[in-house]
Amino acid sequence: MIELSHIHKNFGDLQVIDDVSLKVNEGSVTALVGPSGGGKSTLLRCINLLETPTSGSIRIGDAVVDFAPGKKVGWDAIQKLRRQTGMVFQNFQLFPHRTALENVMEGLLTVLKWPRAKAESHARELLTKVGMAHKADAWPATLSGGQQQRVAIARALAMSPRVLLCDEPTSALDPELATEVVEVLSKLAAEGTTMVIATHDLRLASRVADHAVFLEAGKVVEQGSADMIFGAPKQERTRRFVSSINASQGGYGEGI
Ligand SMILES: Nc1ncnc2c1ncn2[C@@H]1O[C@H](COP(=O)(O)OP(=O)(O)O)[C@@H](O)[C@H]1O
Ligand SMILES: [Mg+2]
């Protein structure tokens, strides 16, 4: 279980996350949706402490960290929480000077100090899972965007995180390449991988998510089952947002 309680995040005078609370059950997939600038990336970055929340608390499994203005959070507590998350970025962020296989092995070797043979065997299994075993020795620059993102997903899974955080994982991809990433994420969802995915790709959200959170101006406007949020939202604001992306993407439930 992942639980965010009353998270606030300010950048100087700008309040970017305004009292967000949400729970993510083990094995569930949560879509974070909402207009650009609404705080989706910041909220994801708060979950793995790439950003430090101004106040509130975060629990992942049995690791809990409380934040308050001026309170210093210990490095051990930060590491304990961060170890439980894997992050997938819009622009992949693979190490360019390492092969696909080496990208996936990196954390196992440097952080977990696994012996090389064990790390390699686990990394190959993960590349197989994302359909990239045949490109194990390829350099990132020689791979398509969809292939790079699949390697990035394998890398994020390498240390067996409790939750996979994905920030617009298909947004940099052409529709065809986005499809192969959606396929991989939906397979992971079917296997019970806990995920939080910020996206405005309704095809991804509707296919993969069971819970959805609509975030605007740093506040949760509405949250509930993905079917409800995308199919019959209660709030007028959510309805307008969903119909505007439906209009541009071809409709929820039509597999587009
Ligand atoms: N490091 C930062 N410093 C100052 N403002 C930031 C920073 N990161 C994000 N913001 C601001 O926070 C708001 C939310 O941004 P973001 O979380 O990226 O939204 P989204 O991912 O929903 O588009 C925006 O107004 C953005 O300009
Ligand atoms: Mg964003």
Image: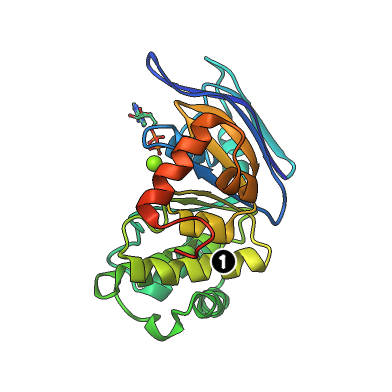
Name the residue nearer the viewer: 38 or 193.
38
Q: Is residue 219 above or below residue 139?
A: above
- Give the quarter of the image for residue 15: top left
Is 244 situated left or right of 235 in this image? left
- Left or right: where does residue 57 sit relative to residue 135? right
Q: Position of residue 14 (x, y in %)?
A: 39, 18
Relative vertical location of residue 16 with respect to residue 80 in this rendering, above or below: above
Ligand 2 is found in the corner quadrant, namely top left
Q: Nearer the viewer, residue 253 or 38?
A: 253
Q: Quadrant of residue 143?
A: bottom left
* Foreground pick, 63 / 74: 63
Residue identifier under label 1: 186
Please tell me which residue is depicted at 47% across the width and 79% down the height of the picture: 131
> Percent x, y for residue 94?
35, 61
Q: Quadrant of the C terminus?
A: bottom left
Under mark 1, the amino acid is: Ser
- On the image, the x and y values in percent for residue 91 come to 33, 55
Label tally: 1
Give me the residue at 37% from left, 33% from top.
37
Quadrant housing residue 133: bottom left
Name the secondary structure under disc 1: helix
